[in-house]
Amino acid sequence: MSHSAQSHQAGLIFTDDSDVTVEQLLEPVNSVLRAFGQQGETMQVDFDQAAIASQTMLVELQIFDAPEADPDTLRVLSSGPRTHLSASSRQALENPTFWVHVSVSETAYDDRRHPETAKAMLAEIVHRLIAETCAPFVQWLDRETVLTSARFQSAFTPISMRNTDATALHHPMHPARVQHPETATMASQPVRAAVASEIFPEIQSETSHLDARFDALRAELKARRQNTWVGTDPAGVTGRTLSSDDELRDVFRADIELDEEDDPKKLEHRVATYTVNATVALINPPVAGALLAYNMIKGEDFRISTHALTLSAVFAAVGTGATQVMAETLALLPI
């Protein structure tokens, strides 16, 4: 069965004045080639382009101004409302500062290699170049497919972040042998843990510390449950105070209790109560004085205040001179 060599391309779109050089892009590409068990060799390096060849792949890089240097970009912009570009992606295409073009092509056939190897390698390279250059947008495969870098990076997990114990022979996309005998001895290289440690050294160095910490906490918890704990309290359990536990509980509390001064409903209640009290003072000052003393000592009682306002208005309308009687009645309230 005939096999056609696979070739895929992508691009990084920049909209700022970032300074990206070809030399800056070489090491991320070589790291991805090593992750795929390939040994990259730089074939060509110019000020704006480079080519890196391995046993079975060819990676080409080019930096150029956009969109004038890329007629396909102008075609995307002229597609009008039919394009599926988002507003931010269209903005990136309309106002780019420069463009990094990346292509991955197969140079040797292997019947055991996964047909999507070239595309997977391109995705890994773009992922690493985003981390290296902080490119905000990615053009992926199709010239009309432009998306943000964050959305592209969230679409898959790079090989460098997966389990590094697997060897190249067990990797479904790694070539086991090649067509040309002169390069067959270079085809299979295991994906060693050193590669991942080179990419993420801080993660590799912290693993043992986290394991030791977890083991100590688990042993302490078991001993405390059995009332046999005689250690030095590495987890700091005996050193914890109630106040720190309360602070932690407050962090995860769903309904936060507001202070009286910060509660807007409480403040509105107080304002309404004293407003009624002031209205009573306009009608009947003696009653207002007794009502004010009651509210200040017993707390703002809006119900009592409205009753006092109603009675004051009624007695004022009747004109029976019951002002003193009402003041004496309020004075009898329990304070």
Image (cartoon, helix red, strand yellow):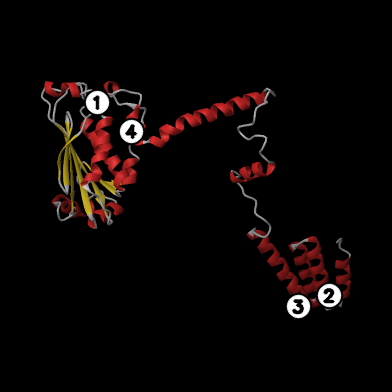
Question: Which residue is farthest left?
Answer: 2
Above/below status of 10 relative to 55:
below
Above/below status of 262 relative to 137:
below
Q: Which residue is mark 1?
A: 174
Q: Which residue is mark 3?
A: 282
Which of disc 1 and disc 3 is earlier in sequence? 1
For numbered disc 3, what is the local secondary structure? helix
Q: Position of residue 207 (x, y in %)?
A: 45, 31
Spatial CA distance of label 1 from label 2 is: 95 Å
At 49% from the left and 31% from the top, the residue drawn is 209
Which of disc 2 and disc 1 is earlier in sequence? 1
At 68% from the left and 44% from the top, the residue drawn is 243
For numbered disc 2, what is the local secondary structure? helix
Q: Which mark is residue 295?
A: none
Determine the image quadrant of residue 278. Answer: bottom right
At 64% from the left and 59% from the top, the residue drawn is 262
Q: Position of residue 87 (x, y in %)?
A: 30, 54
Which amino acid type is marked by label 2?
Pro
Which amino acid type is marked by label 3?
Leu
Q: Are marks 2 and 3 in contact (CB under 8 Å)?
A: no
Q: Which residue is mark 2?
A: 286
Q: Which mark is residue 160?
A: 4
Spatial CA distance of label 2 from label 4 is: 84 Å
Q: Is residue 115 visible?
A: yes
Which amino acid type is marked by label 4?
Ser
Q: Is residue 111 visible?
A: no
Nearer to us: label 3 or label 1: 1
Nearer to us: label 3 or label 4: 4
Which of disc 1 and disc 4 is earlier in sequence? 4
Spatial CA distance of label 2 from label 3 is: 10 Å
